Amino acid sequence: MAKKVLVIEDEPNIVEAISFILSRDGWDVSVHANGETAADTVRGGAPDVLILDVMLPGRSGFEILQELRGEEATADLPVLMLTARGQKKDRDLAARLGVTRFMTKPFANAEVLEAVRDLAGNPAS
Amino acid sequence: MPQSRLTGSRIRERRMVRGIRQADLARTVGISPAYLNLIEHNRRRIGGKLLVDIARELGAEPVSLTEGAEAALLGALRDAAGRRPDQDVELDRTEGFAGRFPGWAGLVAAQHGRIEELERLVESLSDRLTHDPHLAASLHEVLSTVTAIRSAASILTDTTDIDPDWQARFLRNVGEDSARLTDSAQGLVDYLEAGSDVEETPISPQEEVAAFLDGIGFHIPALESGEGDPEAMAEASEALHTSAARDMAARMLARYQADARNMPGPRFAAAWAQSRDPGQVAARFHVDPAAVLRRVAALKSGPTCGLVICDGSGALSFRKPVEGFSIPRFGTGCPLWPLYQALTRPSQPIRTRVEMPGRTPRRFICLAICQPQAAPSFDAPPVFEATMLILPEDPMAETEPGLPVGGSCRVCPREVCGARREPSILSGRG
C-alpha cells in the first residue's frame, strides 16, 4: 500500500504538476486548496507527508502548521513547506513553528521529489 | 508676548513703501523714534496694542506683520540646524540671517525640505517591501506562476513516456501560465515604475487618497448636492492608480455624502456658527459628534481647521492639514494628542488647548471623540475610531498655555516628554 502525501496548495497548475510527479513515483497523492479547512483534511487523511503552501485562501500555512504541531497525532508529521516568501523571517517563523523542510518557489520537481523521499522514505515501504 | 523679531523688518519695509517717516509713525503710536528703530531692526519684540496700532497706521492686519512665509522660513532654518547637532550653528542669530540674506536662507530651507522629502521616500520604500500588500501579492503571483511553468516544462521534457492526454494538459498549462506570467510581470513593472516617479506618484494607497484629496479639496460640491456618485468619482480620478486606493477613496466619499445628506451645508453652517458646540449640533441633526467634527472640516466657508482620524491602533486614516499643526505623513502622531486620549475614553468628548513647539508656540483647540464603529455581528469585538478637529487660535489672542504636544517624536524638539518613543533628530535644539 502506497504512502500518502497530502498537498495543500491553491495554485491548480502547481498542484497538478506535483501530483503528477509524486504519483508516477508511487505515492498516494491527495490535494486540498482551502486554508480554513486544511487542518481538518489533514486529520481525516492521516498523510505520511504534508506539503503545505504558506499563502492560502482563508488561513495561512503558518497558522495551519501551528495548529497541527499542537496536536499529538500530527505533532511529528513531516511537513514540507512551499512558499514564495523566502525571507529569513519567514524561514525563522517556520522553524519556530516546527516545520520539517522549507522550500522556496520556484523549485524544481526533482527537489520536491527528493524532499518527500527524505521525509517519508520509499513510497511503498 | 513672544513674537517673531522679523516682524520689525516687515514693519520697516511696509512703512517705507507707504512713504511714512519713522519719526512720524513713532509719534502717531506714542513711542520714541529710537524705540521704533529698535523694533524695526528686530532688537525689540512687539505685540499687543502697540502692534495693533502700528498695523492700523500702516494699513495692515496685525497678523500679516507677524505671520507668513518668514515664520515658516525661520522654522525650517531651525529644523535644518537641528539636523546637524555636531555643527555649531548660531541659532540665536537665525532671524538676523534670514533678515539679511533671505535668498540664502530660502535656499537652506529648501534644501532642508528636499532632504526631508528624500528621507521620507527612503523610509516609505523600505517600509513598502515589508508591508505593501499589493507588492507582496504581485511577487507571489509571479513566483507561483514561474513555479507552475517550470514544473510543467520539466515534466514535458523529462518524462519520455508521458501519456498524450497528460502531455496535452501540461502543454495547455504552460500556455495558460505563460500568458498569466506576462500579465502579472507587466503589472508588477507598471506598479514599480509608477512608484519610481517620486515627484508625482504616491507610494501607497493611503498616499494616493491623500493626493486625491489635495486635488479635489476637502469641500466637495458634487457630494454636497447629492448628485455625485462616490464610486464613479473614485473610478474617474486620475490620482487614484490602484484599486485599493479607489476603494478607500470611495468609502471616504460615501461617508462625506452621508454627512452632507444628514447635515446640509447652509443649515449646518448656521448651526455651527451659532453654537460651536459639536454636542449641541449633533443633537440638532440627530447625528453623532464625530460626524459633526468631520462636517466642520468640510465646510466651504467654515473655520480654518484641520482634521485627523485614527483607528483603534492609532494609525491615521485621514489627514486634513492646518498651518502650524504638524501632522506626520507616515505612521502615527504625537501620543499626547487629544485624539489618542480619546481612544482611551470611548464616547467621552475631549476639548483641549494644545501647543505646538517653536519659539512662537502655535496654539490650537482640539475637539476629539472616540466612537465604536458598526460591528459585523453582535458578539464581534468592538472597533473604535477617534476623530479630532483642530482649530487654530488667534495668535494675537491672550490665551492660557496649552498642553505641550508635537507632530511626531522624530522631529519634536521637546527634550522632556514622558511620551517620547524615539529620539528626536532635533535633540538638544529645542
Image (cartoon, coloured by chain):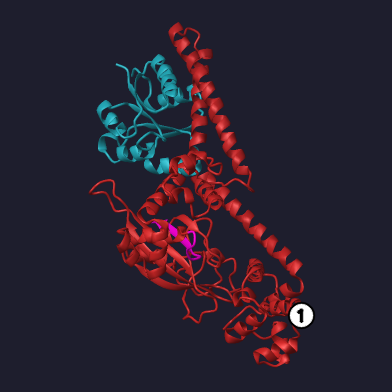
Chain colours: A cyan, B red
Please state which amino acid type lies under the numbered disc 1. Answer: Gly
Residue B26: x and y in percent read 70, 89
The foreground one among A3 and B358 is B358
Residue B33 lies in quadrant? bottom right
Helix, strand or loop at disc 1? loop
**Mark 1 Cα shell of 10 Å, populated few (<14), some (14-19), many (≥20):** few
- From what the image shows, is residue B380 above or below residue A110? below
Query: Which span of residues is magenta-colored?
Result: B300-311
In the picture of the structure, the residue carrying the numbered disc 1 is B19
Residue B251: x and y in percent read 41, 46
Residue at left 50%, top 22%? Answer: B177
The foreground one among B263 and B320 is B263
Is A90 left, or right, of B377 in this rendering?
Answer: right
Residue B11: x and y in percent read 69, 79
Whether the magenta-drawn stretch holds residue B140 is answered as: no
Residue that extends furthest to the left in the rendered view of this protein = B378
Which quadrant of the figure contains the N terminus of chain B? bottom right
Which quadrant of the figure contains the C terminus of chain B? bottom right
